[in-house]
Image (cartoon, grey):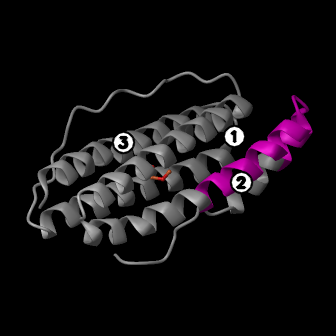
Amino acid sequence: MNPKVESALNEQILKEEYSARLYLAMAIWSEVNGYPGAAAFLYEHADEERLHMMKLVRFVNDRGGKAELKDVDAPPRHYESLLDIFSQIMEHEVHITDSINTLYGITVEERDYTTGNFLQWYITEQVEEESLFNTVLDKIKLVGPDKSGLFHIDKELDGMTTVTTSGPE
Ligand code: OFO
């Protein structure tokens, strides 16, 4: 495997692993602060991020490279509110989208079209995630600090599954 692409994929593995930990930390905060629906949603999303990481791990190894695990930072433990959580999620996902786009750019520069093709799944996934989280964030902004509004949003989040883009396993 092209060493530049391999190293960039390994950086992305770290980012996906951090994403899983970030959503886990947010789920824990939501659960102990009276938002069981948001907790269920975020626990599920943490699992999904781990799948994003695993898909990269398997790809790197299958293509003759070696997936590397690096030190993962601890995510924040304290959050101010659901608004704070979903604002941070949006910011984080925009950063992940940038990172996937940069990675895709490296595959083009290195003429590694197989990896570029594989990354299409992540590009589509990011579009869907940003749209989903934007919808949730808009709703939270709309109700503001109103407790009964937040109660309803929390209930709605319980039934909302996080997006999984179908595609190559
Ligand atoms: Fe949130 O999609 Fe992976 O990181």
Regarding mark 3 in the picture, which secondary structure is present there?
A: helix
Of 73 and 134, the residue lying toward us: 134
Residue found 48% across the figure and 24% down from its top: 76
Q: Give yes or no for contact between labels 2 and 1 (Cβ–Cβ under 8 Å).
A: yes
Disc 3, ligand 1: is the CB inside 8 Å? yes
Q: CA distance from mark 3 to mark 1?
A: 26 Å
Residue 137 lies left or right of residue 133; in this view the side is: right
The three-letter amino acid code for the residue at tag 3 is Lys
Q: Give yes or no for contact between labels 3 and 1 (Cβ–Cβ under 8 Å).
A: no
Number of numbered discs visible in the structure rendering = 3
Q: Is residue 60 magenta?
A: no
Q: Which mark is residue 35?
A: 1
Q: Around disc 3, counting alpha carbons within 10 Å, would you say few (fewer than 14), some (14 to 19), or many (20 or more)?
A: many
Q: CA distance from mark 2 to mark 3?
A: 25 Å
Residue found 50% across the figure and 48% down from its top: 97
First in sequence: mark 3 vs mark 1 = 3
Of 63 and 116, the residue lying toward us: 116
First in sequence: mark 2 vs mark 3 = 3
Image quarter of the N terminus? bottom left
Q: Is residue 28 above or below residue 50?
A: above
Bounds of the magenta span?
128-152
Dividing the picture into quarters, in which one does residue 65 lie? bottom left
Residue bearing mark 2: 157
Give percent across and percent down for residue 153.
Answer: 80, 48
Dividing the picture into quarters, in which one does residue 118 lie? bottom left
Give percent across and percent down for residue 70.
Answer: 20, 37
